[in-house]
Image (cartoon, helix red, strand yellow):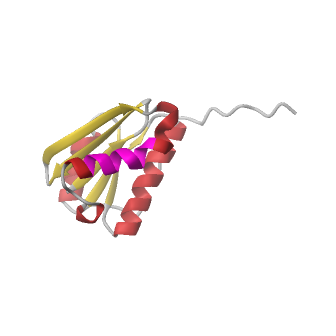
Amino acid sequence: MILALRTDKPEAELYLYNKEVLIDTITWHAHRELSDTLLLKIDELLDKNSTSKQELTGIIVYQGPGSFTGLRIGISVANTLCYSLNIPIVGEAEERWLQKGLKSIVDAKSSKVVIPEYGSEATITKPRK
């Protein structure tokens, strides 16, 4: 089973594939709750489809551009899961990220770690003093 996630916008998306066949998907309004809900939603998707994390064979993650915090949270979770489960990870950007990611996973073209592509500098509030 392959898990795919996209966390660059207020609506987070999870996909579960068996090889290249879509099994199920979950979309929810995560916005500022992403760090609290992402792992719960991953567990919910896997449980709903009688699958465990140990049955995952790879993870595809949307790499950007998009929300600085959303990408950082989603990619950190994906990298951590892949490291702990010793499975491949693929990060893809732009419009056809999911199709390109599936092809890369199936063709065994993965990396050890995915780095976010924010698309621009992060907007950070300047200190008051």
Q: Is residue 129 above or below residue 103?
A: above
SS assignment for the magenta stretch, majority: helix
Task: Please give left or right for residue 45 compared with residue 74 in the image.
Answer: left
Task: Answer whether residue 44 is magenta in the image.
Answer: yes
The answer to whether any part of residue 117 appears in the image is no
The quadrant of the rendering that contains the N terminus is: bottom left
Hey, which quadrant is residue 69 in on the image?
A: top right
Magenta span of residues: 37-46
At a point 31% along the width and 63% down the height, the residue shown is 88
Which percent across, then down, holds residue 107? 18, 60
Q: How many marks?
A: 0
Task: Please give left or right for residue 49 compared with residue 36 in the image.
Answer: left
At a point 27% along the width and 66% down the height, the residue shown is 54
Judging depth in this view, the residue of 36 and 100 nearest the camera is: 36
Task: Answer whether residue 45 is magenta in the image.
Answer: yes
The answer to whether any part of residue 99 appears in the image is yes
Hey, which quadrant is residue 56 in on the image?
A: bottom left
Which percent across, then down, holds residue 129? 88, 33
Task: Please give left or right for residue 40 compared with residue 21 in the image.
Answer: right
Residue found farthest to the left:
21
Judging depth in this view, the residue of 47 and 109 nearest the camera is: 47
Judging depth in this view, the residue of 104 and 129 nearest the camera is: 129
Which percent across, then down, holds residue 5? 33, 44
Task: Please give left or right for residue 97 compared with residue 80 in the image.
Answer: left
